[in-house]
Image (spheres, rainbow, N blue to C red):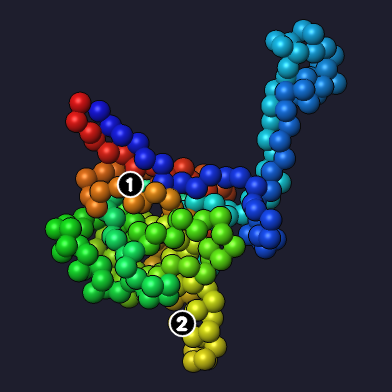
Amino acid sequence: MISLIDLSAPIAPSPEGTPPFLRTDMTYSDHAAGAEQIQALFHVSPNLLRDNEGWAVETITQLGTHNSTHVDAPWHYNRQIQGKPAQTIDQLPLEWFFNDGVVLNMTHKADGEAMTVDDVQAELERIDYQLRPLDIVLVRTGCDQYYNDLDYAFRGCGVTAEATRWLFEQGIRVMGIDAWGWDQPLNMQAEAALTAQEKGIFWAAHQVDLPYSQIERLMNLDKLPATGFQVACFPLKIVRGSAAPARVVAILKTED
């Protein structure tokens, strides 16, 4: 027997007050409208349809590739990674997106208190696990409870560039987090970068010059054990995409 746990946020119209570049907007066409469309296209009247109903259709009028639970491609970070053209989401190997999962619990950390290499190693020691190449590492911050709040983007501890690099060196190619972004909140990064007037502070973990993928805006990591499950996180095959929405699911084996 297996148990499936949905780690994805729903795709739905954004709440009032969401900034335009973050919005998701949808229109809903009901069965009566579908019947009218069928009659207009094929001259089949509603009385020839079951319950006088036609098809229901939803149209997504705005959905950025990063505006839901999504997988980032290296192209999102820079045009070139390690001196080569960065891969877009449709160019990444499927083997990356179905593997054993590991949850690192960072719920004790404050907003902006980024996960370090020492934090990763201490958590792996606590859960008695040694990473294997292509494991999918998920960072639990608890920020999914704020998903529909207007300050969601400004919450979460984030991950340092050094921790990202260390995970990559262990063979990890997909890393995920239940917060708006993988780095520290953007407002905190911006303040630090402006104060120092230096490169390598703003978006440091994204622009670490490594060909890896992030999953951002995960949900329900609190329902998972630390280890002993698999993750399926296949992104939509969007040509030239910097990212793509994904239905991320954890697969747990259970006793009969």
Left of 210 or right of it: where is 152?
right
Left of 22 or right of it: where is 185?
left
Name the residue beneath numbered marker 1.
223
Left of 187 or right of it: where is 163?
left
38, 75: nearer the viewer = 38
237, 158: nearer the viewer = 158
Seen at 39% across and 59% down, the residue is: 142
Q: Which amino acid type corresponds to the residue marked 1 in the rendered image?
A: Lys
Between marks 1 and 2, how big is the CA–CA gap? 33 Å
**Mark 2 neighbour class, 10 Å CA radius: few under 14, some 14 to 19, many 20 or more:** some
- Mark 1 vs mark 2: in front: 1
Seen at 14% across and 58% down, the residue is: 128
Name the residue beneath numbered marker 2.
201
Left of 216 or right of it: where is 36?
right
Reading the chain from its start, which is encountered first: label 1 or label 2? 2
For mark 2, give the secondary structure. Answer: loop
